[in-house]
Amino acid sequence: MKKVQHAGAAVSGRDLRDPNRRPGRLPVSSLNAAPSGQRGFTLIEVMAAFAIFAVLFGVILQILSTSISNTRRSGDFTQAALLAQSQLDMVGIEALPQPGTYSGRYNDEYSWEMVIEPYQVPDDRGVAYADLPIDLYYVGLTVYWGEGRSERSALFETLRSVDRFYAERQEGRG
């Protein structure tokens, strides 16, 4: 056994700073301590981080879901607008517009309803409407798509001008 001389007293294998310390063993307090400069996370810190992650993940999923839904709706509206534009472009081209209500289907998903009415521009200058060389027609086209609660519609409106004397000129040539 090694004898240590300290302040005039011999101590056999014990450290004077910790009287319970045995030779060759680390102090009890050093078993629980992390090496210097390193520290782990507590259970509460890990749980708080997981809760924050779960909330943020849920918010991100909701944002993505809404974004996908809006993209789908936008695509459907764009398709309806393209179908409506091509149909409105044909009004007055193939034949003179006839006032009335018409309806039909583009395909299995899209249907339409069109209203054609004579239109008179309010004129406070006193010009006689019968003297003008054109007729104006209001054309309202409503396109429908979807079913049940998700049914959507879009209204497209325009005015079409028609040469009032077109038919008379065609008869005069023939």
Image (cartoon, helix red, strand yellow):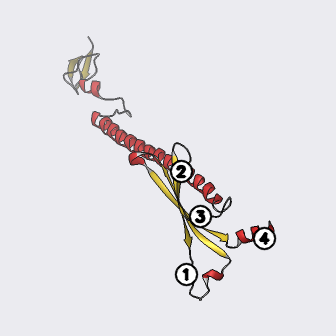
The x and y percentages for residue 173 are 80, 68
The x and y percentages for residue 142 are 51, 57
| Label 3 secondary element | loop
Could you give the CA–CA distance between mark 2 and mark 3, rounded to whole angstroms?
16 Å
In this view of the protein, which residue sits in the foreground, 37 or 133?
133
Binning the other alpha carbons within 10 Å of mark 4 as few (below 14), some (14 to 19) or many (20 upward) gives few
- Residue 172: give its label: 4
Quadrant in the picture for the N terminus: top left
**What residue is at 66 percent from the left and 61 percent from the top?**
95
- The kind of residue on which mark 3 rests is Gln
Q: Does residue 110 appear to the left or right of 20 in the view shown?
A: right
In this view of the protein, which residue sits in the foreground, 137 or 61?
137
- The kind of residue on which mark 2 rests is Gly
Q: Does residue 48 appear to the left or right of 140 in the view shown?
A: left
| Label 4 secondary element | helix
Could you give the CA–CA distance between mark 4 and mark 2, rounded to whole angstroms?
36 Å
In this view of the protein, which residue sits in the foreground, 158 or 94?
94
37, above or below 14, in the image: below
Location of mark 1 (residue): 122
Could you give the CA–CA distance between mark 1 and mark 3, rounded to whole angstroms?
22 Å
Q: Which marked residue is nearer to the observer: mark 4 or mark 1?
A: 4
- Residue 98: give its label: 3
